[in-house]
């Protein structure tokens, strides 16, 4: 009898030096839900159990990629951990290790080991898994060095974010932003006319409207404020231009400008436009021409990359186009469709679409 061929095995290792403490690196590694903050290759992650050997976790890859199910196989707090994932007939083990440096700081290394029956396949998968390690380590380095000692226990950065929303509301805008940040958050769905107007929620938002977020003891209502608040929590994502830069001006300007635009479109829908000299939105022509001029021929409103200003303007244009409350000028359609294709936007819509379907199914049973 012919002996089975030995399994093919391929390894790859990458490392970088980080000016921080082992404790800080371990904080970032063990906070699985926040991996998307510094790992662009992870759209969402969830740990089932403690960060210890034997626990499982799942990772959603970006751009509609697969959902991977993995297991922690060797966890040594403050030193290293190894996770194991089986897919496409191979087993991938990634060891994340760190060692203190004599001059201070730590050397962090990622080592991949891929084992499978086919050498070419193992090599191909190993190369794919490890291809973004340099970028991931640089992002980890940036986050760790920005706050070398990590957030203090009980600080706002360790607090849970809760989104109060309804899937058929402007809460979709806030969810899209939360998905862009990569921050973990909980969702509380409120019903129109009942729980949304109940004393418990009015204690959070006296208006009895959604969305709102609660972050520790901080409560933020109004989408514009929610977006700007969340952007500042994750400076490494560059969802807001840096303070003091010229781009900060148009960032504030176009987020704020959507308030008058919404007031105009709402007033128009009920036939009660105010006189231009009395209304913050002025005349309809001036408001819409100004908005069109802002997006004409541009993909981004505040600098050369995506920010919360693009998200807010695109989401509201898309909302009013959907309900035929805004004339479909080509530049409006282009700008809204462009940003609606972002992975975070698609994830957010999928979550709310599923919630809406659940509510509709539940209503049909009553």
Image (cartoon, rainbow, N blue to C red):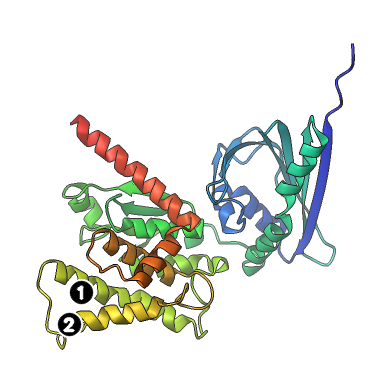
Where's residue 12, x and y in %? 81, 48
How far is disc 2 from disc 1 in space, using C-alphas? 9 Å
Mark 1: few, some, or many residues within 10 Å (few <14, many ≥20)? many
Where's residue 325, x and y in %? 22, 65
Task: Single out the residue that lies furthest toward the bottom.
Answer: 277
For the question of whether residue 362 can be seen, the reply is: yes
Q: Is residue 149 left or right of residue 162?
A: right
Mark 2: few, some, or many residues within 10 Å (few <14, many ≥20)? few
Q: Is residue 260 above or below residue 38?
A: below
Where's residue 328, x and y in %? 29, 67
Q: Is residue 2 above or below residue 85?
A: above
- Residue at mark 1: 264
Report the front residue among 241 and 116: 116
- Residue at mark 2: 279
Marked residue nearer the N-terminal end (2 or 1): 1
Q: Quadrant of residue 105?
A: bottom right
Labels 2 & 1 near each other (Cβ < 8 A): yes
Q: Who's the residue at 22% across and 51% down the image?
A: 196
Q: Is residue 32 above or below residue 220?
A: above
Q: Which type of secondary structure does the marked residue at label 2 adopt?
A: loop
The quarter of the picture where the N terminus appears is top right
């Amino acid at each position: 009898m012919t002996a089975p061929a030995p399994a093919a095995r391929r390894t790859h290792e990458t490392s970088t030096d980080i000016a921080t403490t082992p404790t800080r690196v371990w904080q970032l590694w063990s906070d699985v839900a926040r991996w998307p903050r510094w790992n662009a290759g992870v759209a969402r992650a969830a740990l089932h159990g403690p960060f210890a050997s034997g626990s499982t976790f799942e990772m959603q890859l970006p751009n509609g990629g697969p959902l991977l199910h993995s297991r922690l196989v060797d966890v040594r707090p403050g030193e290293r951990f190894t996770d194991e994932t089986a897919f496409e007939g191979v087993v991938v083990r990634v060891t994340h290790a760190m060692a203190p440096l004599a001059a201070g700081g730590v050397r962090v290394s990622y080592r991949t080991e891929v084992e499978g029956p086919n050498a070419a396949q193992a090599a191909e998968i190993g190369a794919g898994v490890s291809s973004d390690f340099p970028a991931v380590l640089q992002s980890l380095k940036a986050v760790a060095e920005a706050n070398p000692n990590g957030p203090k226990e009980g600080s706002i950065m360790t607090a849970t974010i809760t989104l109060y929303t309804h899937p058929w509301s402007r809460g979709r805008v806030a969810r899209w932003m939360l998905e862009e940040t990569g921050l973990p958050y909980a969702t509380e769905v409120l019903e129109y006319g009942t729980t949304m107007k109940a004393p418990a929620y009015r204690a959070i938002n006296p208006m009895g409207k959604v969305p709102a977020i609660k972050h520790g003891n901080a409560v933020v209502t109004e989408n514009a404020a929610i977006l700007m608040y969340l952007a500042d929590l994750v400076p490494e994502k560059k969802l807001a231009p840096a303070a003091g830069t010229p781009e900060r001006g148009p960032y504030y300007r176009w987020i704020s400008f959507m308030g008058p635009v919404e007031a105009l479109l709402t007033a128009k829908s009920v036939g009660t436009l105010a006189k231009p000299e009395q209304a913050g939105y002025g005349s309809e022509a001036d408001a819409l021409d100004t908005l069109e001029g802002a997006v004409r021929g541009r993909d981004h409103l505040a600098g050369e990359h995506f920010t919360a200003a693009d998200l807010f303007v695109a989401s509201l244009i898309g909302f009013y186009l959907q309900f035929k409350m805004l004339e479909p000028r080509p530049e409006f359609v282009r700008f809204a469709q462009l940003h609606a294709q972002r992975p975070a936007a698609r994830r957010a819509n999928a979550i709310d679409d599923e919630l809406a379907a659940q509510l509709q199914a539940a209503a049909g049973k009553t």
